[in-house]
């Protein structure tokens, strides 16, 4: 693979992760509170403030880890591919957790509203 294809892979995965995070933000912080499905009160501001660096950082990690794994598979010796691939997948998993943070918080609030009266 050429270096430009690695850059295209990074850009594509970053934009997909970022787009997914934007959709989750809109649903979590605009749609669900607007419909009255959740009423988190003051916690909503804290969650929103925390979700911004986690979401952007998560999108960056997803893009970077996919590029890292592609470069590892292209260049690494077969013995170290497994460890490096695992590290890249771990980074991507952390990135997904950052992107899904608002959804997890809102889902917890919604479930607590349903089950705890």
Image (spheres, rainbow, N blue to C red):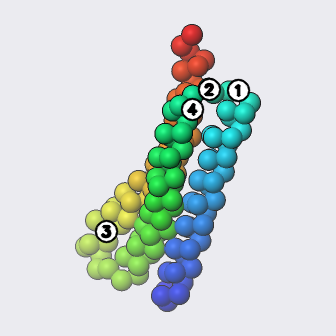
Q: Position of residue 77 (x, y in %)?
A: 29, 80
Q: Position of residue 86 (x, y in %)?
A: 34, 61
| CA gap, disc 4 and disc 3 | 34 Å
| CA gap, disc 1 and disc 2 | 7 Å
Q: Position of residue 27 (x, y in %)?
A: 67, 42
Element under disc 3: helix
Find residue 36 and name its label: 1
Pointers 4 and 3 in contact (CB under 8 A)? no
- Crowding at label 3, few (<14), some or many (≥20) Cα neighbours within 10 Å? some
Element under disc 1: loop
Find residue 107 and name its label: 4
Residue at far left of view: 79
| CA gap, disc 3 and disc 2 | 43 Å
Decide if residue 96 is in sight here.
Answer: no
- Crowding at label 1, few (<14), some or many (≥20) Cα neighbours within 10 Å? few
* Image position of 82 (left or right of 101): left
| CA gap, disc 4 and disc 1 | 13 Å
Circle 4 or circle 1, nearest the eye: 1
Residue at far right of view: 35
Q: Which residue is mark 3?
A: 84
Find residue 13 and report its image quarter.
bottom right
* Image position of 25 (left or right of 91): right
| CA gap, disc 4 and disc 2 | 12 Å
Pointers 4 and 1 in contact (CB under 8 A)? no
Q: Earlier in the sequence, mark 3 or mark 2?
A: 2
- Crowding at label 4, few (<14), some or many (≥20) Cα neighbours within 10 Å? some
* Image position of 95 (left or right of 107): left
Q: Nearer the viewer, residue 74 or 109?
A: 109
Q: Earlier in the sequence, mark 4 or mark 1?
A: 1
Q: Residue at x 47, y 55 (%)?
A: 53
Residue 55 vertical position relative to residue 40 in the rendered view, above or below: below
Q: Which residue is mark 2?
A: 39
């Amino acid at each position: 693979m050429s270096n430009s294809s690695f850059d295209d892979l990074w850009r594509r995965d970053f934009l997909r992760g970022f787009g997914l995070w934007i959709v989750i933000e809109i649903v979590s912080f605009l749609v669900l509170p607007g419909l009255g499905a959740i009423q988190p009160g003051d916690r909503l501001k804290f969650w929103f403030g925390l979700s911004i660096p986690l979401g952007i950082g998560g999108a960056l990690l997803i893009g970077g880890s996919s590029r890292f794994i592609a470069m590892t598979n292209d260049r690494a010796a077969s013995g170290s591919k497994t460890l490096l691939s695992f590290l890249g997948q771990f980074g991507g998993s952390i990135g997904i957790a950052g992107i899904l943070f608002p959804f997890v918080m809102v889902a917890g609030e919604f479930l607590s509203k349903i089950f705890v009266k």
